[in-house]
Structures are given as C-alpha cells and as structure tokens.
Amino acid sequence: MTETTLRNRLDTPRRILALPISRALLALLVILLLGAVFNAEGAFFRWDTHRDMLRHISRYGILACGMTLVIITGGIDLAVGSVLGLVAVLSALFLIHWQWSPLAAVPLCLLAGLGCGAASGVLVARFRVQAFIATLAMMVFARGVAKYISGGRKISQGVQTADGFEYLDFPAFFDLLNARILGNNIAVVTLVFLGCAVISWLLLSRLRPGRYMYAIGGNEEAARLSGVPVAAIKTLAYAMSGLFSAVAGICQTAQETQGDPEAGASYELTAIAIVVIGGTNLMGGRGGVSLTLVGALTIGYLEKILSINAVGEAGRLMLTGFIIVAAVLFQRTRR
C-alpha cells in the first residue's frame, strides 16, 4: 500500500464528516442516543412518542421549508410566525364562524399568506430594504391585522348573540387534518409537512428558479451579471415562505380548533433554528431541504426527550439554546 493510498483512506472519514448532511445526521444521532439513555422508563421506545413528536414538529417544519428557500438566497424571514397567526384567524373566521366550504376558505387563506410573503419580497428585492427590516415590518403588520380582525380575541366555536352564547359546529375539514392514518400511526399534518418538503425539494433541485436561488445566495451581483432575474427570484422565495406559513396557519387552527391572534409568536426563531441545525448556511448559497428535515427531527426529538423526562420549561429553553449554539459552532469548525 503506497503512502498516497494510505493517506487517502485516512482522509476518507474526514471528508465524509465535512459534508453538511453527515454533520446534521451526527447531531441527530447524538440526540437519539440521549433519548435511548434517558428514556423515561421506556417511553422513548414507544411509537406513540415518535408519532406525537412528528405531529408537534410538523408546523415548525412547514415554516422551515419556506425559511430554507429564503435563507438560501441570503435573506431571512422574521414574519412567518405572524403570518401564521393571521391565517389562523382568517381560517377560523371562514371555517368556523362563517361556515364556508374549505374549497373557498383554504385558497383565500393561502392567497393571504402568499400576498404577505410577496410583499416582503418586493420590499427586499425591488426597494432594496434590508431583509431584517422588511420582514420585521411585515411581522408587526401581520400581527396587527390579525388582532384587528379578531378584535384581540380568540375565534372559537362560541359566538355571542343577543340571547347568550351559541356554539357552532367544527368543520369536517378539521377532523381530516387532525386524523391519524396507516393504522393510527401517522398524523395527516405530518404528511402535509412532508408534502411541503417535497415541493421545496423539487423547486431547489429540479427547477431553474431553485438553481437561481443558490446562485443569488452565493454571489448576488455575479448572478445579476449572468442574467439571473434576481428581483423576481427573491420575491418568489419570500412568496413561497408566506405560502408555507399559511399552510402552517391552517394546520394550527385545525389542531387548536380556534384562531388565536397570538398564534405563531416566536415560531420564526424555531424555524430558523431548524434550518441552521440542519446545516444550511445562513449566509446563503448552500443548504437544502433534506438538511432541514434532519434539523426538524433533531429539534423535535430534543424537545420530546426533555418533555418526557419532565424537564421544566426554563430548563428546556436553556438547554435548547445551548445545543443550538453548539450545533452552529460544530458546523463552522468542520468546514
């Protein structure tokens, strides 16, 4: 065996670990090993624990799918949580109070989310407003609209009338989103999350706008000089983020059976954490939805393990913050 061959064999594990997906999977493996050790008297090994984790993380994962597109272009979207809250209010109003058909209500809700995202994109791409400022403004605006429409109250099945309170029926559409299929083993909302991930993957991996997003995140000026329609592609990324936020908002309403104008507060931070832990570069140009899926599982299992071991909320928040920082530092040191 020559010295060059020996050196190549020794360097192979290092090259494998240098891949973002390898580092993301390693972080997930560490979390799973912690769950196996601190299994809460076997609770971690029961399927219902994993099923409930997937159901819980799905809303955040849907937001993270859109956030991945924006971050790959070198941007950030702080408005996803507020857009979720706005759509939660709208969907509750349409489906519960007004008893609209989902065929009419759902497209309007999706259009509202798409419009919010596109507005942020136009501010960033056309008017050259910094993404942090533009999406911060949209975050405040969308939350204000949600509170204005709802009157600052949760929209639920109880409606005040002259004779007291009238309780309306929940739409069958809620039962559909809350259902469990495949032998009661998978929640429908988890399939919605996977559907959003597939759409994002197709956009990034199989369509020209996805390649343009990577080009813009890598070097925006070079992409512009190469003929990439930078403004249109960046607007598309933010519009897709708003669309996915609307999907998450509808799922939120179905799961909570109400439209809360405060819903989604701080969800944007969890979505960003999922993307970052997965290994997508915050500076843009590198990453993907497959990494985001691993990041969602990592965050989901971390929260579930802390929950089944009865770790208090304060402890869960501190430990989660520590692990996020550790994961980011690990990503940086291995490049």
Image: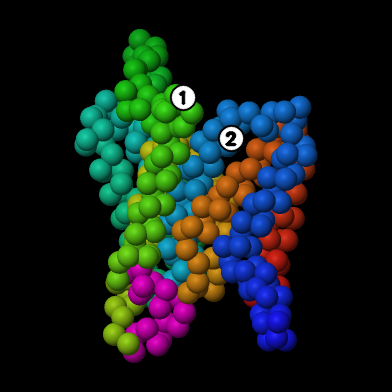
Relative horizontal placement of residue 160, taking residue 60 as reference (left or right): left
- Label placed on residue 268: none
Residue placed furthest toward the front? 1
The image shows residue 137, relative to residue 143, as above or below, that is below
Amino acid on which the number 2 mark rests in the picture: His
Residue placed furthest toward the top? 163
- Which segment did they paint magenta? 209-225
Of residues 5 and 238, the one nearer the viewer is 5
Q: Position of residue 57 (x, y in %)?
A: 54, 42
Of residues 246 and 209, the one nearer the viewer is 209
Q: Which residue is mark 1?
A: 184
Mark 2 neighbour class, 10 Å CA radius: few under 14, some 14 to 19, many 20 or more: some
Is 66 contained in the magenta span?
no
The image shows residue 67, relative to residue 183, as above or below, that is below
Q: Position of residue 113 (x, y in %)?
A: 35, 50
Q: Position of residue 198 (x, y in %)?
A: 38, 52
- Closer to the chain start, of discs 2 and 1, is 2
Is 223 contained in the magenta span?
yes
